[in-house]
Amino acid sequence: MTKIVVTTKEELSAFIREIVQQPIEDLKTSINELVKPSKKNFTVKEVAVHLNVSELTVRNYIAKGFIRADKIGRRVIISSENLESALSEVKSLKYRR
């Protein structure tokens, strides 16, 4: 069954704009997150939970140089960029013969 709808040019353009608006906004926010990712710093405990290992293991990774970390006072801070680069290096070494 075919349905014919009679509308004006303005109504049609408003309808199309309304339908297309939300996906465009979602795309803009996704692009902004990729271009300017939010920088986040993690503690040793947060990284341990994220990697599903113990805090001692994370501290050993830092001591061995697998993960780059900064010390602020007594606190050890790991940036998300350093964590991602460490994880990508581990993946590349895993498949290397």
Image (tube, rainbow, N blue to C red):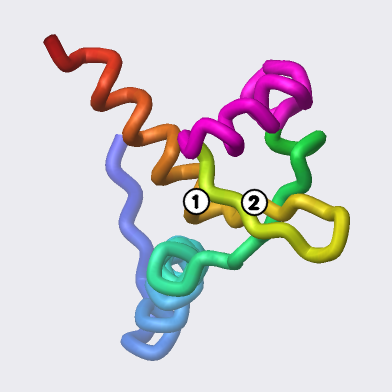
**Residue at x 36%, y 71% (from the top left corner):** 6
Say what secondary structure mark 1 lies in: helix
Q: Residue furthest bottom?
A: 10
Instruction: Determine crowd level at label 2: few under 14, some 14-19, many 20+ residues with C-alpha closer than 10 A.
Output: many
Q: CA distance from mark 1 to mark 2?
A: 7 Å
Query: Which residues, given as a range, are shown in magenta?
Result: 48-66
Image position of 66 with respect to 92: above or below: below
Q: Which residue is mark 2?
A: 78
Q: Residue furthest right?
A: 74
Q: Quadrant of residue 61?
A: top right
Residue 82, numbered label: 1
**Image quarter in which the N terminus is found:** top left
Circles 1 and 2: CB atoms closer than 8 Å: yes
- What is the total number of numbered labels drawn onto the structure image? 2
The amino acid type, in three-letter code, at marker 2 is Ile
Q: Residue furthest top?
A: 97
**Residue at x 64%, y 51% (from the top left corner):** 78
In this orientation, which residue lies closer to the viewer: 36 or 88? 88
Q: Is residue 65 left or right of residue 75?
A: left
Say what secondary structure mark 2 lies in: strand
**Residue at x 67%, y 21% (from the top left corner):** 57
